[in-house]
């Protein structure tokens, strides 16, 4: 709090700043995990993205029920307390918080996934997936979501059609098109 900071020592100030930096870094890592899990699940699901009736412009997932707009983030709408969604990420009980999907192990709070994009060690950072080249330890991706510069935010992904204007969407995969 600001009134505490006037009298805090240099050590306390450094610790506070380190905590703030760590919090921001953790938030960014969580966002990255959600983004890449979303990409992976999209490619695994084989869901067609061109059904305009089921298109929710704020997300890149489709429900089994095209009229349903509720999903859990990234499968939920803006109301995080909403439990209703009819999609492949839920088990047979739609009110359950447990996901029956390849990206979660039995502990939904776990960071480890047991999925086809992980090698046999679920804690490993190495992917054996279509986004990796033949060397699974390589950091270079050969995938539709990145251009030749792997640090670039630009990508050519299945969530955009050739004309970026009508299919423009607000998602982590958005392009910086001049007409967007």
Image (spheres, helix red, strand yellow):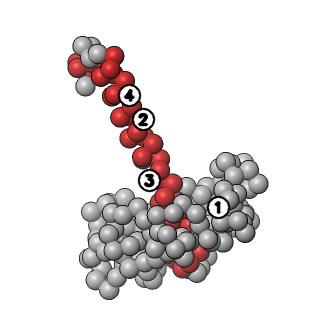
Q: Secondary structure at mark 3?
A: helix
Compare marks 4 and 1 and give the one earlier in the sequence.
Answer: 4
Frontmost of labels 1 and 3 is 1
Rendered position, 112 above or below 66: above
Name the secondary structure under disc 2.
helix
Q: Decide which of tag 1 and tag 2 comes sooner along the chain.
A: 2
Mark 1 = which residue? Answer: 137
Residue shown at 40%/39% (left/top)? 22
Q: Quadrant of residue 40?
A: bottom right
The crowd level at tag 4 (other Cα within 10 Å; few <14, some 14-19, many 20+) is few
Q: Secondary structure at mark 1?
A: loop
Mark 1 or mark 3: whose residue is earlier in sequence: 3
Mark 1 to mark 3: distance in Å?
A: 22 Å
Mark 2 neighbour density, 10 Å: few (under 14) some (14–19) many (20 or more) = few
Q: CA distance from mark 4 to mark 1?
A: 34 Å
Quickly name the residue at label 4. 17
Determine the residue positioned at 60% across, 58% down.
173
- Tell me, yes or no, whether the two marked residues, 4 and 2, touch with CB atoms within 8 Å: yes
* In this view, 19 is above or below 174: above
- Which x, y percent locates residue 118? 54, 70
Residue 135 in the image: state x and y as whole percent. 70, 65
Residue 86 location, quadrant: bottom left
Taking the spot 55% from the left edge, 71% from the top edge, the residue there is 119
Q: Which residue is mark 2?
A: 21
Disc ID at residue 30: 3
Rate crowding at label 3 as few (under 14), some (14 to 19) or many (20 or more) other CA atoms within 10 Å: few
Q: Residue furthest front?
A: 121
Which class describes the residues within 10 Å of circle 1: few (<14), some (14-19), or many (20+)? few
Q: Is residue 24 left or right of residue 52?
A: left
Check the picture and name the quadrant holding the N terminus: top left
Q: In front: mark 4 or mark 1?
A: 1
């Amino acid at each position: 709090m600001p009134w505490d900071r006037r009298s805090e020592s240099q050590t306390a100030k450094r610790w506070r700043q380190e905590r703030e930096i760590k919090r921001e870094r953790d938030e960014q890592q969580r966002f990255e995990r959600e983004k890449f899990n979303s990409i992976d699940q999209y490619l695994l699901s084989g869901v067609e993205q061109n059904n305009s009736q089921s298109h929710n412009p704020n997300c890149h997932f489709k429900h089994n029920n095209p009229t349903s707009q509720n999903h859990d983030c990234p499968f939920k709408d803006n109301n995080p307390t909403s439990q209703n969604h009819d999609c492949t990420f839920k088990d047979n009980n739609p009110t359950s918080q447990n996901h029956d999907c390849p990206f979660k192990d039995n502990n939904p709070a776990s960071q480890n996934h047991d999925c086809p994009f992980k090698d046999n060690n679920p804690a490993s950072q190495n992917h054996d997936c279509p986004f990796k080249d033949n060397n699974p330890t390589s950091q270079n991706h050969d995938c539709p979501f990145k251009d030749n510069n792997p640090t670039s935010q630009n990508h050519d992904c299945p969530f955009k059609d050739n004309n970026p204007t009508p299919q423009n969407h607000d998602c982590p995969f958005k392009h910086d098109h001049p007409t967007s």
